[in-house]
Image (cartoon, coloured by chain):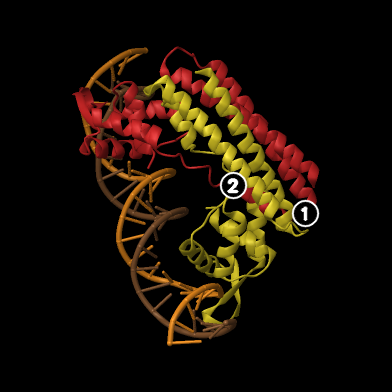
Chain colours: A yellow, B red, C orange, D brown
Amino acid sequence: MSLRHAVLGLLAERPASGYDLMKRFESSLSNVWPATQSQVYGELGKLATAGLLTVAAEGPRGRKEYAITEEGRAELHHWLIETEPERFRRSEVLLRVFFLGSVSRFEAHTYLELEAARSDRFHEALKDLEGSVEWGDDQMSVYGRLALEYGLRQTAMQAEWARWAARQI
Amino acid sequence: MSLRHAVLGLLAERPASGYDLMKRFESSLSNVWPATQSQVYGELGKLATAGLLTVAAEGPRGRKEYAITEEGRAELHHWLIETEPERFRRSEVLLRVFFLGSVSRFEAHTYLELEAARSDRFHEALKDLEGSVEWGDDQMSVYGRLALEYGLRQTAMQAEWARWAARQI
DNA sequence: GTTCCCATGTAACGGGTTACATGATTGA
DNA sequence: TCAATCATGTAACCCGTTACATGGGAAC
């Protein structure tokens, strides 16, 4: 049920149309909470019906600009502060590790080395992203940087673990 | 589409009934790939129809013991070695971080410290698990330990990151 | 005038969760 | 005999993905 909060969170910063939101999902939230166009438009409709958003303005080409309401802000705050986030679940990488006993040691070793290389590549991609984004003083820049640092630490840890695991075999 | 591979992977070790599989999902895979009872029974039916499993034996109370076929093993091997695992997606913890600008600095700081404490608690729970499991020489023990080490490193990294992030604010 | 970008929506499908429904066997 | 455990299955619902469908406005 977090897509609604992602939408509320983005609109809390400033009003936007569904189209605008999609771009922001793609540019800043894609690694954290991806969403498709049909999902976003659907959710905007539901949130407006529920009174957490309003259509603040209508523009050309049927553009509807949504703005968060007081109830919307209250719901966002409630979610952020008073509810616990879901712990991580479902890792395809780890699921495979459980079954490495069903292939040869050589294949298992290769899998883990490959996984290390993939983590390195992702780590580098995040560093490139860090270098290419124009970081400002806005909300998204400040907190987006914290999230990116998490990604850097995560990918580094994954690569180290995979190399360690490969040595264990 | 990984539930089918989880089922194949468990049955590759030894034949089992749906009921047996559920217990194994709960005891060893719960942190990596949780599954519900209705999912497991449904998947067993589909896999048997597709010829990746067979009903090897029937027991009391309508018990059906499933065994993996050669095609099943081939599919498991193909998935494990020749396909790429999905990279991590959707972190509710990080989604919230993006929106910490919409609450006070004090609340943002508290959230991150709380997150650090939650990571510590999960880390300790994993250590307890490590101490309580009877580790043998079987496939699941060897590779399960690698997965558990990942969890330990992950939770440690999360706690460190959250404390670092709290200091940034 | 044609191509890009802006802009919104619907439909079909698949996977996951929860709840419902049923019943046999074992052991205290 | 009663409770716990073994054992299988179905139905409804929600969420996410992919594909389809449509059209206005701006710039060249």
Three-letter amino acid code at the position of disc 1: Ser
Residue B78 in the image: above or below residue A126: above
Q: Is any atom of residue B117 visible in this view?
A: no
Residue B58 image-quadrant placement: top left
Q: Chain of mark 1?
A: B
Q: Secondary structure at mark 2?
A: helix
Kindly identify which residue carries mark 1.
Answer: B104
Vertical arrangement, residue B12 with respect to residue C16, above or below: above
Q: Which residue in the protein does label 2 denote?
A: B92
Q: Estimate how packed mark 1 is, as few (under 14), some (14 to 19) or many (20 or more) residues with alpha carbons within 10 Å.
A: few
Out of B15 and A169, give the one closest to the viewer.
A169
Residue at the location (51% across, 63% down)?
A: A40
Pointer 2 chain = B
Which residue appears at 79% of the width and 45% of the height? B168
Which one is closest to the eye, mark 1 or mark 2?
A: 2
The earlier-in-sequence mark between 1 and 2 is 2
The image quadrant where one finds the N terminus of chain B is top left
The label on residue A88 is none
Foreground of the two, B100 or C21: B100
- Kindly state the secondary structure of the residue where label 1 is placed: loop
Image: A125 above or below B60? below
**Which residue appears at 50% of the width and 68% of the height?**
A45
Mark 2 surroundings within 10 Å by alpha-carbon count, few (fewer than 14), some (14 through 19), many (20 or more): some
B149 relative to B76 in the view: left or right: right
